[in-house]
Every structure is written in C-alpha cells, then in structure tokens.
C-alpha cells in the first residue's frame, strides 16, 4: 500500500490492520506529539483497560513541515535500538508491540501514566535513588552487548553497517559539535551571556578540543548508542508502589562513542542543578553524575568476564573505562554549551525568570569539562569544578 501519513482518524483502522486492536467501536485516539520531530498518538478503550502509543516518522521535521525534509529512516534506527535494548534492558524501555517499516510506525506501550524526567525536575522534584543508577546500568548493558567485547566480530560489523544513521548524526555533528563555536544562523542566546558566546567563538583551545570530540563522535564505533539521552528521553513514575524508569526516543541511535550517551545525561543533570540553585531548591542533583557513572562502571565490570574476545585483558578494561569517562565529560561539556548558545535550548533555563546566572555558570562548567577532561579523574573532581566560585 506504500507509505501513508496517518492522521488521528486513520489510527483505529491502522491498528486493526496490523493486528494490534480488534474492536473498532471501542477505541479513542488522541495526538500527543509534543516533540519537534515526529507524531505520537495514544489509543485507548472506553474502560481505560487497554491502550497503546503509536509513533510515526514523517519525511520532514514535524514542527517545520515539508520545508525541512528529514528521511523517515530515523524510525528504523529507533526500532533497531529498541530491538537491542529489549535484549538487555527490557524493563527500562517501553514494551514494543510492533514496527512497520513501510509506514515508519512503531506501536508501543502507553507510558502516559509516567512523566518526562525533565518535567518532573523542572517542577522541583528530586531524582530519587533509582533513576540515575538505572540509566547508568542501561547504558552499560547496551554498550557492552553491542561492543566488540559483547558481540562477535562479524556480527558487530553487520550491526555497524545496519545502524548507520547519517542524517541524524549530521544534525548532532552540526548543532552540538560545531555550530556553537562558529557564527551560525541557528545560534541564539540570552543577551546576558553574549560575552561568553563571543569568547567561546574566539577560544582557540576550546575549539580544538571540540574538534577532537567531534572527530571521536564521527569515528569511534564503540557500541550502539541511544544517541539522544537527555532528560526529555526518560520517563519516571511509580507502578504498584515501585519506582519505574523508561528510556524512550532512541531515533539518533548509531554505533558511536559510549561517552556520548553518558555525557548527554550528565549535561542535563548539571543544567538542572544550576536551575535548582537559582531557585534555591537544590535536591539530590549533586549525586547524579556519580550514581550513573558508578552504576555504569560496576555493570560493565560485571559483564567483562563474559566477553567474547579474551585478548582484551583486565588491564585493558581499566584503560577503556578511563577513556569512556574522559570522553563522557567532554561530551557533557558540549551538550551544556550547545543548549545555551546553540540552536535548541532547555526549558530548565528558558523558564527561569532570570536565567543569566545559571546559564553563565553552566557555560563555564561546560567549558571546563571539555578543556580539562583529561585531568578530571573522578566524580569528586567534577564536583570541585561545579563548586568553584564564578
Ligand atoms: N510510549 C509513549 N507513551 C506515552 N506518551 C508518549 C510515548 N512516546 C512518546 N510520548 C509522548 O510524546 C512526546 C514525544 O515523543 P518523542 O520524544 O518520542 O518524539 P520526538 O518527536 O522524537 O521528540 P523530540 O523532538 O524530542 O525528538 C513525549 O515527550 C511524550 O510526551
Ligand atoms: Mg526524537
């Protein structure tokens, strides 16, 4: 039948056709797309006992329309990432009911009883003891299982080839890993940080370090990544009294440097911390980088004895983890900076009445993480950077 762009009214028949729903009389559908890129619909029955979510990629960016074409192949990347994640972290992603490559449509568990982590944090809630450690563990499991430690060499080569995601990688290479450091029409900023934006563009040392990270992003095929692991890609809540964490929206997935996933998560935690500092309501922000790193490291070390290639010895594990740590810090720095002087900003800061102090502190922390990443050896060293008077 070919690729059909689904409207709200098409969803019941579509779900039936795909075998997800039988009774066409008992289904209500609403569109809940609040991201920038794709469409998301929720379908539920009258009794509220059954519901599913459907996400469809259009051949353009949803909020821009056909004037900004973007291949719907990104839905294939998302489906592929979920396929790998389902093997190693099935309880930390939405259950996937089916993927339809012809229509670039993914039918999955309805998560609307949960809330997006960024929303929860912006409202003043804490992370709680579980969220960041579950994220760290998920990153370790995805990373290990799709690395040359967890996957036989030939299978890995096939995964790398199947997972190329050129358009979405290019977006990252541009908006995260170059534009904020040059004059570009995408860039914008609050006038209170204009001096820092100009300083960063003139900062030769910073530019070379970002170039290094950009090249790592482009060439370091360590593991399958989520690719966009910020606090808007995590849902949290409780079910039957137990804490629940769900990672979603892995459409930027490709085989890249593991530190990119950790770094994005850390950057968003550090920016959330600066928001909370401005509002005088810091909670457990200071623990999150350490919690996620410790969970990542201990899970990766726990998986190490199962590696498929034992030429990689324990001494190499230490060296490898050190490299991941260092690159994570660098990527965290780039994510902080691009979210303040680049294209897409964060509600953590934009909803502050006066975002200047938090933005300035975050920018300077971001710069330090990039240029000093090789000498920052532990989570405590990062806390020392955050605690420096600015
Ligand atoms: N499985 C789900 N259950 C309930 N709501 C969902 C589900 N998936 C997505 N949503 C809702 O739709 C929103 C957009 O989803 P998602 O982030 O996957 O789309 P996107 O267009 O790729 O967004 P972005 O612009 O952030 O990349 C989410 O923030 C959430 O509110
Ligand atoms: Mg998305």
Image (cartoon, rainbow, N blue to C red):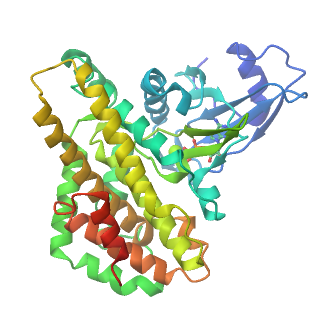
Residue 134 on image: x %, y % = 48, 40
Residue 371 on image: x %, y % = 20, 67
Q: Quadrant of residue 206?
A: bottom left
Q: Is residue 142 above or below residue 118?
A: above
User: Does residue 87 appear in this view?
Assistant: yes
Residue at 49 percent across and 67 percent down: it is 273
Q: State ligand 1's quadrant.
A: top right
Report the number of numbered marks: 0
Q: Is residue 304 above or below residue 270?
A: above
70 displayed left or right of 316: right
Q: Nearer the viewer, residue 79 or 288?
A: 288
Q: Nearer the viewer, residue 383 or 2?
A: 383
Residue at 41 percent across and 48 percent down: it is 292
User: Does residue 224 appear in this view?
Assistant: no
Q: Is residue 114 above or below residue 54?
A: below
150 displayed left or right of 32: left
Residue 241 on image: x %, y % = 71, 38
42 displayed left or right of 136: right
Residue 49 on image: x %, y % = 83, 25
Q: Quadrant of residue 181?
A: bottom left
Q: Quadrant of the C terminus?
A: bottom left
Q: Quadrant of the N terminus?
A: top right
Residue at 11 percent across and 36 percent down: it is 315
């Amino acid at each position: 039948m070919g690729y059909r762009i689904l409207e709200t009214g098409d969803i019941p028949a579509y779900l039936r056709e795909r075998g997800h729903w039988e009774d066409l009389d008992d289904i209500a559908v609403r569109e809940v797309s609040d991201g920038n890129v794709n469409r998301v619909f929720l379908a539920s029955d009258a009794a509220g006992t059954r519901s599913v979510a459907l996400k469809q990629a259009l051949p353009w960016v949803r909020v821009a329309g056909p004037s900004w074409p973007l291949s719907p192949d990104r839905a294939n990347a998302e489906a592929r990432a979920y396929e790998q994640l389902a093997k190693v972290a099935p309880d930390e992603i939405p259950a996937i009911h089916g993927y339809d490559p012809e229509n670039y449509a993914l039918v999955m568990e309805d998560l609307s009883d949960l809330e997006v982590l960024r929303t929860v944090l912006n409202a003043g809630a804490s992370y709680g003891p579980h969220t960041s450690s579950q994220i760290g563990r998920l990153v370790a499991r995805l990373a290990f299982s799709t690395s040359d430690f967890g996957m036989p060499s030939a299978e890995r080569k096939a995964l790398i080839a199947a997972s190329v995601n050129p358009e979405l990688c290019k977006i990252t290479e541009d908006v995260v890993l170059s534009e904020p450091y040059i004059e570009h029409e995408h860039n914008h900023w609050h006038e209170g940080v204009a001096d820092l934006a100009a300083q960063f563009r003139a900062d030769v040392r910073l530019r070379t370090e970002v170039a290094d990270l950009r090249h790592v992003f482009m060439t370091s095929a360590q593991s399958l990544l989520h690719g966009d692991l910020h606090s808007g890609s995590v849902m949290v809540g409780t079910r039957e009294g137990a804490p629940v964490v769900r990672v979603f929206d892995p459409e930027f997935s490709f085989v890249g440097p593991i530190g990119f996933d950790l770094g994005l998560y850390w950057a968003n935690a550090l920016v959330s911390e600066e928001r909370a500092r401005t509002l005088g309501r810091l909670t457990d922000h200071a623990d999150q980088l350490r919690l996620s790193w410790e969970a990542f490291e201990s899970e990766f070390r726990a998986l190490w004895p199962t590696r498929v290639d034992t030429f990689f010895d324990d001494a190499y594990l230490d060296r490898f983890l050190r490299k991941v740590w260092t690159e994570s810090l660098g990527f965290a720095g780039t994510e902080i900076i691009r979210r303040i002087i680049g294209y897409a900003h964060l509600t953590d800061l934009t909803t502050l009445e006066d975002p200047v102090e938090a933005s300035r502190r975050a920018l300077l922390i971001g710069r330090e993480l990039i240029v000093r990443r090789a000498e920052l050896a532990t989570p405590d060293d990062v806390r020392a950077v955050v605690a420096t008077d600015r």
